Image (spheres, rainbow, N blue to C red):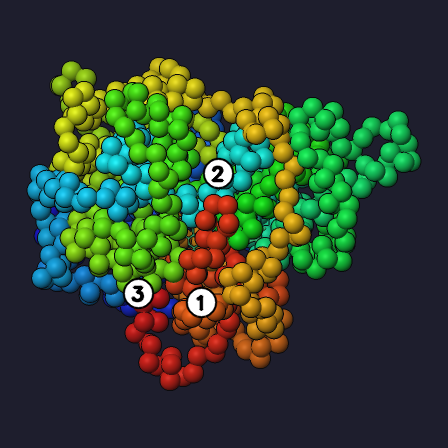
Amino acid sequence: MSSSSTQEDPILTAATEFSDKGSYAPPLSRSLAGSQVDTPPGGGWPSLKAVEKFIWQAHLPIKGHASLMKMNKPDGFVCPSCAWPNGDKPKGANFCENGAKALAWEATHARVSDQLFADNTLSDLREWTDHHLELEGRLTHPLRYNAASDRYEVVSWESAYAEIGARLKGYDDPNEVEFYTSGRTSNEAAFLFSLLGRMYGTNNFPDCSNMCHETTSRALPESIGIGKATVNLEDFKQADAIFIFGQNSGTNSPRMLGDLHEARGRDAEVVTFNPLRERALVSFADPQSPKDMMSGKGVDISTQYHQVRIGGDMAAIQAMCKYVIEADDALQVRDPHAQHYLDHDFIAQHTHGFEAFADHCRSLDWDTLVETSGLSRQSLEQAGRTYLEAERVICCWGMGITQHARGGDTIQQIVNLLLLRGNIGKPGAGPCPVRGHSNVQGDRTVGIENLPKDEMLDAFDRVFDIQCPRAPGHDVSECCEAILRGEVRAFIGMGGNFFRAIPDQKRVVDKVCELDMTVHIATKLNRSHLHPGKQGWVLPTLGHSERDLQAGADGKGAEQTTSVEDGMCNVAPSRGVMAPADPSMHSEIAITCQLAKAALPAHPTLDWDWLQADYARIRERIEAVFPQIFPDYNARLAQGGFHIRIAPRERIWHTETQRANFLFPEGLGTDEAELDKVTHQTLDLDSTFLLITMRGHDQFNTTIYSYDDRYRDVYGTRMAVMISPQDLKTLGLSEGQRVTLHTVSDDGIERSVPGFRLKAYDIPSGCLAAYYPETNDLIPLGHRDARSNTPASKSVPVRIELMSSEEINASEGVLASA
Ligand SMILES: Nc1nc2c(c(=O)[nH]1)N[C@H]1C(S)=C(S)[C@@H](COP(=O)(O)OP(=O)(O)OC[C@H]3O[C@@H](n4cnc5c(=O)[nH]c(N)nc54)[C@H](O)[C@@H]3O)O[C@H]1N2
Ligand SMILES: Nc1nc2c(c(=O)[nH]1)N[C@H]1C(S)=C(S)[C@@H](COP(=O)(O)OP(=O)(O)OC[C@H]3O[C@@H](n4cnc5c(=O)[nH]c(N)nc54)[C@H](O)[C@@H]3O)O[C@H]1N2
Ligand SMILES: [Mo]
């Protein structure tokens, strides 16, 4: 381990203006620079400049650098950032601005040093910002928490495995241990991690997807029999209209903008529903298009941009359905021989429940739809008309749909819309949930599942000669509740930053010190590591970009390949090209195998070292457990990867009715109605706002690359809260004033976060937006989608309170670090 912590700030000193760790001066004048006047397009030169800056500051020369050029290439590694498919680009660069940031962040030269813990107790480090913690660089040596000194100390791998294993062996109830996974983990590592947990005796597999697209994974199968996208990139090339609900492509899946740009080039319609005008969805200059770059002008991406109220999507979608159904009704009255607007053949052959849904839509009243969606009747009809006129339609959605109390119901309305005109199972059409982490989908495919089906468990039992537990385990919300009840003894995190990403963060974190043990397998130091149990370990691991050397099939040593599944069900090989951050580091797979050896009784046929030696052996086992999904896994991976068979593409529906189902809830299912359940009181809409908690352009979830959000004109701070100018006026407040946000709830728990600066923004009245994870203390754990327990992070009921100058002075230290 290096002894010095004086490494040059690897990334970003120029972008942020902090003077020292934990404190910096936000440049106020810039941070509140005028909002949307003359906004430049997303992408363009600033995007290239950002790539250069990040790469340069991480000491990776941009041109010809092996690592960057190997990203998303057949013989290279899969970008660690988002789950948008790579497409077929054997030559040239195949990465985006934010992929380059993710790589630079992982490939930094900085290392967490002994000195860091000599100089700082964990209590000291808890005062640091998330940004500064990760800025310390890569973790390279196993760390063990010493409660007496409140510091982490370097320990050997052997002692870490032995001690963690011994503790796990000592617990009598396996269901008091939680096995968390975050979505960067490869298929091979996730599969073994789930095997470890099941052999240990539990299905407690909270996963980052439980805070993310779990809504999709639970609601979509009820409709069409599978919880994944039915489209692939080829379909994007053929779609006549692409609808985007609640997804910020420019920041969170920038390569998607290339596909949207291409669609606009052939005059396809792009219809966006989003309370915020997200710059790159308005217009985008593709850094790979000479024309865009020379002209400095972007291409208009959204042909319609509907600034729906927060949680108003269900009303908006049902309004479109109503429009299409009633247009078809009217047409049949006018001319019974005319071609129908609805695909009646498809509906009759392939669907169930149409008549009830159609009657429901017919009965909806326009005034209510307009009021609930926050959109004019004209806008809703225009969107409906565009849907009706397009032959092939794709509907995309992101966290703006999934992170709502009625998220699952809304997803089912998106499916209904698609079903009306047979837009599933034909080229250029279908549902496209835009997934987050690079392998979040794959982790779930290979067994990370807290509600496992018997079929899968039977297969695990057969293949490994084991007895998997059958009782359901915890998801993220249930894991948090169990911690609050004092029913968790140990938490083992495969990646991620669980204790920072969860709702009701402070309440849960306050209980972590009562756990017997925490173990975090991670690349970078983060806030979760600073809240150990009575015993705590941090085990450093390799990232996607690093070479992974194991014993190999013949014991002579061989570099290993892992695999990941993108958001459109393509499984691709990933092979790191860079030297590991430290030669002594272990891969996620090695760590899982060694923990399993230490924690489980010996098994007559299962040899963990043998599996670790050659990852192809792990894939053979994955194929044996999931023969339908991974036939010829190794052979097809060696050929560059494959697409997983998705039954609805062939109009085969694995639902209870064996058809695609039109499903809808009672009423309009607005978030407000749902909020009554959380708050148990009728909201006083004059003072209660709905708050979106979302990502800025320079972050990856809890990893904060910089304090700027170029696309929203926020610079040097993450404590901005966006509010409509009209609401500012009504409240008698002005831009730049500091406020405290208080959660509105009547569960007796006071949740508030001070120090936000008001920023006038183009957002509907009654709606606010601020950044995650700074807002996570505000989200009540119980405020979540009913089907999937996904936290409703996009509709937090809050009240705004102006801070007094005394309060501002009193909390200056805290505010300075935010
Ligand atoms: N660079 C980068 N890439 C990432 C990530 C990252 O942090 N940084 N995170 C990854 C992960 S894990 C995920 S899940 C994805 C997340 O990607 P997104 O799904 O884009 O997530 P968010 O940034 O949280 O915001 C989603 C959008 O929803 C909108 N929205 C909020 N409420 C509503 C609503 O009620 N209705 C509608 N129609 N829209 C609404 C917001 O204005 C915002 O534009 O990105 C992945 N990719
Ligand atoms: N309020 C609010 N809360 C949210 C959200 C929101 O929109 N609003 N979004 C939710 C969503 S969509 C998600 S997915 C979760 C994200 O929750 P997580 O997935 O738990 O969090 P991340 O911030 O992605 O985790 C970052 C950490 O992962 C570790 N890491 C990075 N790469 C690797 C690797 O290759 N291997 C290993 N082992 N570790 C690695 C690093 O130590 C880094 O500090 O947050 C959720 N929380
Ligand atoms: Mo996510």
Specify the quadrant that holds the C terminus: bottom left
Crowd tier of the residue under label 1, counting other residues whose Cα lies within 10 Å: few below 14, some 14–19, many 20 or above: few
Task: Name the amino acid type tagged 2.
Answer: Ser
- Give me the residue at 23% from left, 48% from top: 490
Q: How far across and down, in percent of the image, does residue 258 sit? A: 53, 37
Q: How far across and down, in percent of the image, does residue 798 sit? A: 50, 68
Q: Are marks 3 and 2 in contact (CB under 8 Å)?
A: no
Q: Secondary structure at mark 3?
A: strand
Alpha carbons under labels 3 and 1: distance apart: 38 Å
Crowd tier of the residue under label 3, counting other residues whose Cα lies within 10 Å: few below 14, some 14–19, many 20 or above: some
Crowd tier of the residue under label 2, counting other residues whose Cα lies within 10 Å: few below 14, some 14–19, many 20 or above: many
Task: Name the amino acid type tagged 3.
Answer: Phe
Q: Secondary structure at mark 2?
A: helix
- Label 3 or label 1, whichever comes before in sequence order: 3
- The mark closer to the camera, 1 or 2, is 1
Q: Which residue is mark 2?
A: 217
- Give me the residue at 37% from left, 84% from top: 806
| Ligand 2 within 8 angstroms of badge 3 C-beta | no
Quadrant housing residue 595: top left
Q: Which residue is mark 3?
A: 18
Nearer to the camera, 170 or 532: 170
Q: Which residue is mark 1?
A: 747
